Image: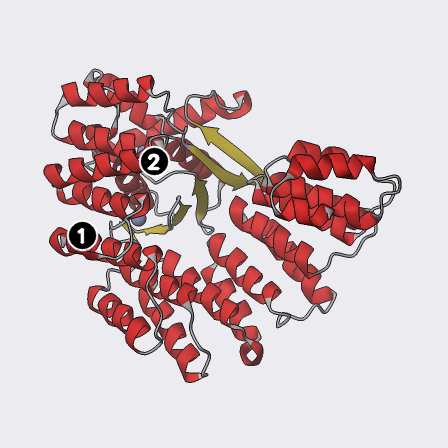
Amino acid sequence: MLHGYVKAGEIDFAVSLFEEMPEKDLVSWNIMIDGYGKCGKCEQAEEIFERMSCRDVVSWTCMISGYVFNRRPKEGLDAFRKMLCSGIKPDAAAIVSVLSGIADLGFVEEGKWIHAYISRNRIVLSSGVIGSALVDMYSKCGYIEDAYGVFTSFASRRSVADWNSMISGFAIHGLGHRALEVFRDMVRMEVEPNEITFIGVLTACSHGGLVQEGQFYFDLMQENYKLVPMIQHYGCMIDLFARAGNLKEALGIIENMPVEPDTLAWKAILSACMKHGDMTVGEHAAFSTIELAPNDSSSYVLLSNIYAKARRWDDVAKVRLMMKERRVRKIPGCSSILVNGKIHEFLVGKDMDLRYRSMILQKMEEVMCRLKLAGYKSDLTQVLLDVEEEGKEILLTHHSEKMALAFGLISSNKVVPIRIVKNLRVCCDCHSFIKLVSEVYNHQIIVRDQNRFHHFKNGSCSCNDYW
Ligand SMILES: [Zn+2]
Ligand SMILES: [Zn+2]
């Protein structure tokens, strides 16, 4: 009964039923923790967890996955550690949860430790989910070769989920050809691809700029595998054409597809318009996105950027007013970097850790100087506000990834790449800035943004400036 209510999302009914139970067994306690976690109420889940007199591996796993599910990966990781300390051995579900939390955080150290734990305890990777969770963790932390290493280590026992993780991994790293190679291997091994496989394959084509291949696999999934494309597949195709500058084709798909376009589809068009400078279509795409998701600040920002690029400052002001009236808040950019085993976060508009502040600002000044000598000019269209040119430059300088990068330059050894994780999309200015830093300072830089990885080296980026 309890389980039924929780499953139906009737958490309030479940609570009263639970509290009235004269004798609560372990299963009901666990159901409640799980239920609270799934409806976003971590605090209540913690409360139940604290009240338990004895906990089993399921109680801990529900708590860990609750944190991870609610995008609180750090707490999930802490809970995992506490579980080990209390002498409870994690099961596959706990390991998968904590790996996905680490993938969210984006820093590999903890993931390597879990990987070692798996090997030490002889936990078999072919148990379905752990293998693909490891592949996923390594690729989302930017260690694509390690992901591939794990993937090849259980060659004979792979499930379709394992293949899918590897294909998506290569895709987000912009390694389109390698993703397709894995797909072809999968077909050779007679593993039947599913819808998710093709999302990976098509993403690989769009991120790798492989237009013809994308079209080929889009047809193949329908003709050979009789799969009906979903909105995500159409989204990939729209993205594929839009990035390549073929807006007409992209718009044709939006108009003719049998499903309603979602915000991602319109955003793909919007980003392409920004890149290729098409104001009219861009404006239309922006308004369509805003209509579908009026609370999502990123579409307003893109619209405002489009106007700013055309120097239509009145319209920029209108967008800002619209955001204010609708109480839409811009998500502050946040970049994190791992230095000496500690994650440091840089948040736009929030003051930095005082211990490092002056050091970072000083480094930033030096970087700016050296970059300007190398021909860098700030791309002032990337600023939302209509402020004086000089003020704009200061706003741009303070983008979180630049701060994180300055800190990275101070604290890292040249042989290891600087790794930064950013919560939003990297803006054009930061992108060209980082490219130039990788050249001038001869330092490899890897940035994970909202959508993909950018590997910066010798002044160019693996995304080929398509992102
Ligand atoms: Zn930026
Ligand atoms: Zn890039």
The location of residue 129, given as percent across then percent down, is 59, 64
Percent position of residue 138, x then y: 52, 58
Query: Residue at the location (65% across, 38% down)?
Result: 11
Q: Does dot 2 land on a helix, a strand or a loop?
A: loop
Q: How many marks?
A: 2
Indicate the quadrant where residue 334 lies.
top left
Q: Nearer the viewer, residue 13 or 390?
A: 13
Rendered position, 402 above or below 117: above
Q: If you read the primary sequence from the N terminus, does the residue marked by circle 2 or circle 1 appear first?
A: 1
The label on residue 374 is none
Q: Is residue 341 visible?
A: no
Which mark, residue 293?
2
Q: Is mark 2 within 8 Å of ligand 1?
A: no
Question: Quadrant holding ligand 1?
Answer: top left
Cα distance in 3D space between marks 2 and 1: 19 Å
Q: Is residue 238 left or right of residue 226?
A: left
| Residue 106 in the image, given as x and y percentages of width and height | 51, 47
Q: Amino acid at mark 2?
A: Ala
**What residue appears at the point 51 percent right and 59 percent down from the top-left corner?**
136
What residue does disc 1 label? 255
Confirm whether residue 329 shows in the render.
yes
Q: Secondary structure at mark 1?
A: helix
Residue 257: where, in percent of width, then height?
Answer: 23, 57
Name the one closer to the observer, 377 or 235: 235
Q: Is residue 344 left or right of residue 433?
A: right
Label 1 crowd (10 A; few <14 / some 14-19 / many >=20):
few
Above or below — where is 304 with respect to 161?
above
- Label 1 sits on what residue type? Glu
